[in-house]
Amino acid sequence: MNGRRLVLLSRFFFLSLIVAITGCAQTNFQQYEGRNGAQIIEGEGGTKEIIDGIEYWGTGTPPRRYQILGVVTIEDFDNVFGNQRIRHAIADQVKAAGGDAAIAMDFSGGGQSMGVGVNSRGTVSSGTAFGKKSNRYLIVKYLDKRP
């Protein structure tokens, strides 16, 4: 019985790992609408990273004039594979919306847990479970193009 349980646990762990590696980020884009038309903002600066040709503003805002096109919510597993998929999914959404950059709004969820067990034969086994996380970004278009 213990050997069978170990086999089942190892299969479950392996399948969980496969899902975490091969899963895909779920995205939801919502277009911005305002009472007076487009919302034009003059940013003040912050920190940015460029990935797939798109600027990601992790803190602050771009130090230039921009228009809000919409908000994208992206959900994926909270692990290294999920984080990479999230970044590429954001870039895809920015490009699809005709934008130039993404500005971080908020992050939620996530978490990771790990368990270790010893069976009756003294064999040690372990497993890791990853939670899901959800990120929201403003998608913006620059109004003062720079070369």
Image (cartoon, rainbow, N blue to C red):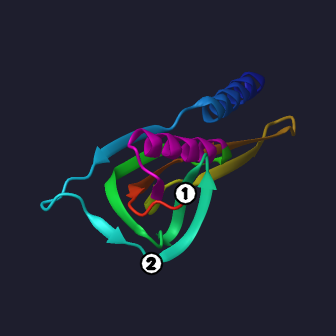
Horizontal side of residue 97 vs 48, given as left or right: left
Q: Position of residue 113 (x, y in %)?
A: 63, 51
At 25% from the left edge and 52% from the top edge, which residue is drawn? 32
Q: Residue furthest right?
A: 122
Horizontal side of residue 118 vs 31, given as left or right: right
At 59% from the left edge and 48% from the top edge, which residue is drawn? 53
Say which quadrant the N terminus sits in. Answer: top right
Say which quadrant the C terminus sits in. Answer: bottom right
Q: Nearer the viewer, residue 144 or 54?
A: 144
At 57% from the left edge and 47% from the top edge, which residue is drawn? 87
Q: Amino acid at mark 1?
A: Glu
Residue tagged by mark 1? 55
Residue tagged by mark 2? 44
Horizontal side of residue 107 vs 40, given as left or right: right
Q: Position of residue 90 (x, y in %)?
A: 49, 46
Name the chief secondary structure element in magenta. helix
At 61% from the left edge and 60% from the top edge, which residue is drawn? 49
SS assignment at label 2? loop
Q: Nearer the viewer, residue 40 or 48?
A: 40
Q: Which residues are magenta?
A: 81-102
Q: Residue furthest bottom?
A: 44
Q: Position of residue 22 (x, y in %)?
A: 62, 29
Instruction: Assess disc 1: are there few (<14), some (14-19) or many (≥20) residues with their C-alpha within 10 Å of its C-alpha.
Output: some
